[in-house]
Image (cartoon, rainbow, N blue to C red):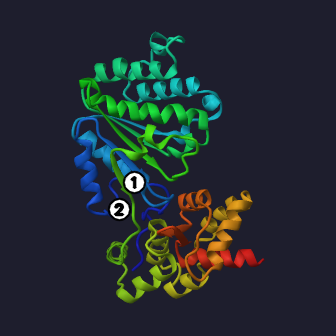
């Protein structure tokens, strides 16, 4: 029997109470253990739609269960003139943090133009947040990639986060701060990796689902599958969490058979049409990136492409790596983009 109409659509992060969240043990356990440590830093890296936000949400929920204060900021919410200068951005950042813990911002009391905005922001966090809250504080930053688009701000903001993490080694109050940073890309631009939070702390790179996890998820969707169906689906989309869940969602509602779904998958008639068209639109806006992907999908074996193009295609989730070479992340992308390059 098909599932009820209340079945959640597989778009955006998986709800905290969802039966369709797939744990990728031991990742969750390691994150929970780490967030309890003084001055902890967790950095979650994976291409888009791989589950970064869903994991970040669960780390925040776990921290709240420990009695910690939590501050969750999606950096995509920073709009317009917020990125006009580092000073403007850090004032916005401090105001957001205060709002999340229901404290009056009182920015002007801490902002001294002679000290510089980084010192102002650091003083604000120490004296206005950490000392007043007097408990562990988890600062969770989602979509950190947004800041990389403003190099001047990135070169001030990320070294500041690194300095906060380092302060915990010598200053007791900074032990209260625990950082979680989620991002997709490795293209750090002009940022000095050694003066950033991206080579310290607990690195978490989310893998694709295994065949066992896909089979388990199919059972949760009440699909009576054997290994054959699991392998047929994964031959097209691999273990990509979003692509797998979208397929299982449509199959559970009996909207399409597995055979028809796989036949139509790389076409405009398939369930992935909007997802694929969005990627194609982004590629058409970046001819160098489009040309790099053309090399990848046209080759029968892994190929080597320019490093920055590889980083960007990886952050989009379109390729996977084999040492210093790359290949399409899944057969769906190979077939769809091959066809589009031929048009």
Q: Observer-nearest residue: 284 or 164?
A: 164
119 lies left or right of 190? left
Give the SS element for disc 2: loop
Q: Quadrant of the N terminus?
A: bottom left
Q: Observer-nearest residue: 198 or 83?
A: 198
Q: Looking at the image, tell me whether mark 2 or mark 1 is earlier in sequence order.
A: 2
Give the SS element for disc 1: helix
Q: Position of residue 34 (x, y in %)?
A: 25, 46
Q: Which residue is mark 2?
A: 21
- Binning the other alpha carbons within 10 Å of mark 2 as few (below 14), some (14 to 19) or many (20 upward) gives some
Question: Is the C-beta separation of discs 2 and 1 under 8 Å?
Answer: yes
Q: Quadrant of residue 221?
A: bottom left
Q: Observer-nearest residue: 79 or 343?
A: 343
Which residue does the image show at 58% across and 24% down from the upper left? 88
Q: Quadrant of residue 265?
A: bottom right
336 lies left or right of 226? right
Residue 285 shows up from this direction: yes
Which residue does the image show at 56% across and 86% down from the upper left? 260
Q: Which residue is mark 1?
A: 54
- Numbered label attached to residue 302: none
């Amino acid at each position: 029997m098909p599932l009820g109409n209340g079945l959640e659509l597989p778009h955006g992060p998986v709800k905290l109470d969802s039966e369709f969240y797939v744990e990728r043990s031991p990742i969750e356990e390691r994150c929970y253990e780490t967030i309890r440590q003084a001055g902890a830093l967790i950095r979650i890296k994976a291409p888009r739609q791989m589950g970064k936000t869903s994991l970040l949400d669960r780390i925040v929920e776990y921290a709240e269960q420990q009695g910690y204060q939590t501050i969750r900021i999606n950096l995509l919410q920073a709009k317009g003139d917020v990125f006009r200068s580092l000073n403007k951005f850090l004032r916005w950042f401090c105001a957001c943090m205060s709002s999340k813990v229901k404290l009056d911002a009182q920015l002007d009391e801490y902002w001294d133009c002679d000290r510089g905005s980084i010192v102002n922001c650091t003083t604000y966090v120490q004296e206005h947040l950490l000392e007043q809250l007097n408990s562990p504080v988890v600062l969770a930053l989602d979509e950190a990639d947004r800041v990389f688009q403003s190099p001047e701000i990135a070169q001030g903001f990320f070294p500041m986060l690194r300095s906060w993490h380092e302060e915990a080694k010598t200053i007791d109050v900074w032990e209260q701060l625990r950082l979680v940073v989620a991002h997709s890309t490795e293209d750090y631009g002009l940022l000095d990796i050694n003066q950033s939070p991206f080579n310290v702390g607990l690195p978490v790179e989310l893998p694709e689902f295994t065949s066992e996890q896909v089979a388990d998820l199919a059972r949760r969707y009440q699909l009576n599958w054997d290994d054959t169906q699991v392998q047929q689906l994964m031959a097209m989309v691999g273990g990509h969490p979003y692509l797998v869940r979208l397929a299982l969602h449509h199959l559970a509602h009996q909207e399409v058979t597995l055979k028809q779904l796989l036949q139509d998958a790389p076409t405009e008639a398939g369930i992935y049409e909007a997802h694929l068209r969005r990627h194609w639109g982004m590629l058409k806006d970046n001819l160098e990136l489009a040309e790099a992907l053309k090399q990848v999908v046209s080759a029968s074996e892994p190929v080597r492409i320019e490093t920055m193009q590889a980083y960007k295609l990886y952050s989009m989730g379109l390729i996977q790596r084999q040492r210093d070479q790359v290949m399409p992340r899944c057969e769906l992308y190979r077939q769809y983009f091959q066809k589009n390059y031929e048009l």
